[in-house]
Amino acid sequence: MKKVLAKAYLYLLLAMLYAPLIFIAVFSFTESRVLGNWTGFSTKLYANLFTGGMNGGSSLLAAVENTLIIALISAAIATVLGTIAAIGIFNLKGRKKAGMQFLNNIPMINPDIITGVSLFLLFVFLGITQGYVTVVLAHITFCTPYVVLSVLPKLSQMNPNIYEAALDLGATPSQALRKVLIPELRPGMISGFILAFTMSLDDFAVTFFTRGTIGLETLSTYIYADARKGGLTPELRPLMTIIFLIVLILLVVMNIRRQKANQSK
């Protein structure tokens, strides 16, 4: 009976997680503007999404473009800064190291709305005009700690004598960093980049408070504004389906590669 209840509980959780996604995916193949109203199979919403043939189509595509650009820039810079910070924290000793790790964890635990309001007040105090730049700076700020958290375990697993041996053999610190440290830390850096990209892609609160009034829209703020009008643009359904499929394919590919790497060992 315990096994049956455990399986039933697991299936219930999976159904609650994936049923809405499947529901959206199914109704992305119909022209109805009302979600849940099936008017026959059609790929018109997908065509409208890619051709911009819809009401507000250009603004939706612009929001997607802004979201991807901001996420890529923020994740790339956060990966560089986070890797450097992780190396610095790792080389600290005792209470200094513990204190820096504690400070690094605070932004991840801190609610997004507090981070957003704090950065908003900071930009206002400094007199920085809010817009694209402030959003990117804000995203870099809250993404960097996640990169640090991803890189630190790789530093702990690495043999510290490799870096010192490179210096003893005549390599400069920059050469040892590029040819020894970075190859060893690359898996952690990639994981940190993906995590930072996902966090930036998903963010709403920080973006909402730091985008200003110039009309900058990301996907999350676009959906929020669209929902306040009393409904969602139908073309969001195929967009959500495509994003879900891309993430699913990436996860499958990563798991297959991980299994092959484990088998080769």
Image (spheres, rainbow, N blue to C red):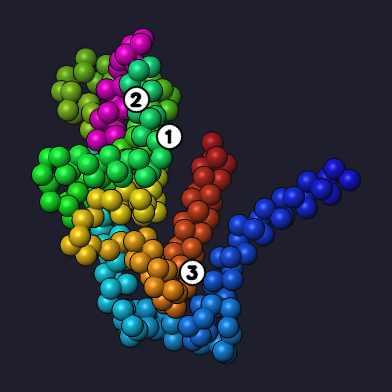
Q: Are marks 2 and 3 in contact (CB under 8 Å)?
A: no
> Residue 228 at what x, y percent from top left?
40, 68
Helix, strand, or loop for circle 3?
helix
For the N terminus, the image quarter is top right
Q: How many residues crowd around disc 2 within 10 Å: few (fewer than 14), some, or many (20 or more)?
A: few
Whether 92 is among the magenta residues is yes
Left or right: 49 as drawn, with respect to 258 = left
Q: Quadrant of residue 97?
A: top left
Real-space Cα separation, disc 2 to disc 3, in angstroms: 38 Å
The kind of residue tagged 3 is Thr
The kind of residue tagged 2 is Leu
- Give me the residue at 27% from left, 22% from top: 88
Residue 77 seen in the figure:
no
Q: Quadrant of residue 121?
A: top left
Instruction: Indicate which disc residue 109 carries.
Output: 1
The residue to which callout 3 is attached is 241
Bounds of the magenta segment:
81-97
Real-space Cα separation, disc 3 to disc 1, in angstroms: 30 Å
Question: Which of the marked residues, 2 or 3, is nearer the chain's N terminus?
Answer: 2
The kind of residue tagged 1 is Ile
Q: How many residues crowd around disc 3 within 10 Å: few (fewer than 14), some, or many (20 or more)?
A: some
> Residue 259 at what x, y percent from top left?
56, 45
Question: Which of the marked residues, 3 or 1, is nearer the chain's N terminus?
Answer: 1
Q: Main secondary structure of the magenta part?
A: helix
